[in-house]
Image: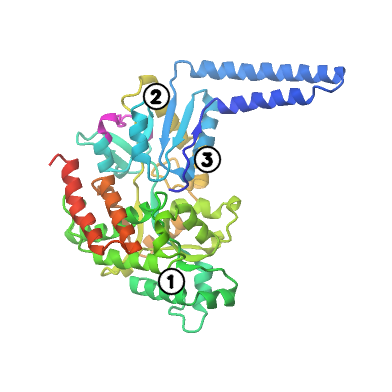
Amino acid sequence: MKKKAVSVMLATAMTATLFAGCGNGNEGNASATANTNDTKQEGEAEAETEKAGEEDTRSEMAAGGGSVYYLNFKPEQDEAWQKLAATYTEQTGTEVTVITAADGTYEQTLKSEMAKEEAPTLFQVNGPVGLANWKDYCMDLSSSEIYTHLTSDDFALKNDAGEVSGIAYVIETYGIIYNKKILTDYCTLDNAVISTPEDINSFEKLKAVADDIQSRLDEINDTFGYDLQGAFTSAGMDGSSDWRFKTHLANLPIYYEYKDKGISSTDAIEGTYLDNYKQVWDLYITDSTCEPGVLSSKTGDEAESEFGMEEAVFYQNGTWEYGNLTNPDNGYLVTEEDLGMMPIYIGADGEENQGLCTGSENYWCVNSQASPEDTQATLDFLSWVIASDEGRDSIANTMGFTTPFDTFTGEYEADNVFIQQANQYIADGKTPVSWNFSTIPSETWKDGVGSALLEYAQGTGEWDAVVSAFVDGWATEYAAANGQ
């Protein structure tokens, strides 16, 4: 859930590159001797013939077989999807286009793309609310091969008629990522408020540690050679970052209110835990690498870099960040051994028994209004993604996903320290926090809460505006979404 650009992969791009390479080679040999040139031209002619034969074979395979257009939700996995799509095209001849929406723009991009003649054949919704918006475009997947590989029907998103309108493709976890090395070093200082990172099991202890680190940045840097700028990374409210707070952090007060009431959705949130929401947000914007007044322009990439370069100890994000933080091409100082994840504590009763936030908002849907050839091509592509060696390796080992499919076993189980930690919390008897933000009534609600959070942080608004956006905005948006 990061980065920013919209990227497109056309299935013909690889072939075009191959031919461009041959063309450049011919130009480079223009001054060679006649005999050498003749020999090379003969070899190149054979290569061209072979490539043309491969193209003819792929064209025959693809003829009448339809094509796939996937509108991808996850920018951080864009490169992996482009490579996977290219591999599938090479193997089958089926044209696969992958377009990735920029952070925070998926719904807007989906609306725009669905209005085009060449609309996505594969897209995603984030749960029941998203399904309500796109139910007329969701093919019933009850008889699809991919549905038969779900490990539980809990991962099938069904409409009012009981049809399988969407299938979850990744189970994810988020919390507060922390640097174990820095936190362990901090614990050795005189008067450190904890003796080990595992001592943090409540908001009270998290705040005590963060406050102490923020007040001792120079001491920590001088003692251990770090370049810490703050306890927490910047809580950026740019579109590439604000979802972390107006959606993922907002899940905590929703979760605890639902838990108290024994419900899984509501037409009117009461905001019982908004004081808790406030104290966490205050912590994020106070014990930070930057002043609250600049949060409007701070991006998700900046927060990631601050953590990766050991400028901050704590970073709210999820399992999807594992690949970015451990990618050697990014040049980060943090290593896999340094990574830990703890629950987001907000000061609720019993939170010492709380685990990480685990669930899914990522459901594949096949466009029922696409041609029969394209829908079949899309179903075939999905089957290949979850069953082939190439697909499973990319999903598990490159993208780092934990999936709900029975095909992902052994070497195709994601090697991700955050996932391992989530499992350890469960093994220790901690209760995972469910993803209730999929019941948020609309994107407009999220935007209203996000704007109010930013105004409050900048000192241009009051917390009452956040409460109003959260509570009144929920009732208004729920009524609008349900024709009330």
Sort mark 2 into few (<14), some (14-19) or many (20+) by Cα contacts within 10 Å: few
| Residue 207 makes an appearance in the image | yes
**Residue at position x 20%, y 63% in the image:** 272
Quadrant in which the C terminus appears: top left
Sooner in the amino-acid sequence: mark 1 or mark 2: 2
Residue 320 image point, x, y percent: 45, 50
The residue positioned 33% from the left and 70% from the top of the image is 352
Q: Disc 2 vs disc 3: Cβ atoms closer than 8 Å?
A: no
| Element type where label 1 sits in the image | helix
* Percent position of residue 152, x then y: 32, 44
Q: How far apart in space, not on screen, are marks 2 and 3 (Cα)?
A: 22 Å
Name the image colouring.
rainbow
For this view, does 3 lie left or right of residue 432? Answer: right
Residue located beneath label 2 in the image: 118
Circle 1 or circle 3, nearest the eye: 3
In this figure, which residue is indicated by the disc labeled 1? 198
- Label 3: few (<14), some or many (≥20) within 10 Å? some
Three-letter amino acid code of the residue under disc 3: Glu
Residue bearing the label numbered 3: 79
> Which residue is pictured at 79% across the width and 21% down the height?
40
Residue 385 point in image, percent of width and height: 46, 35
Q: Range of the magenta residues?
A: 134-146
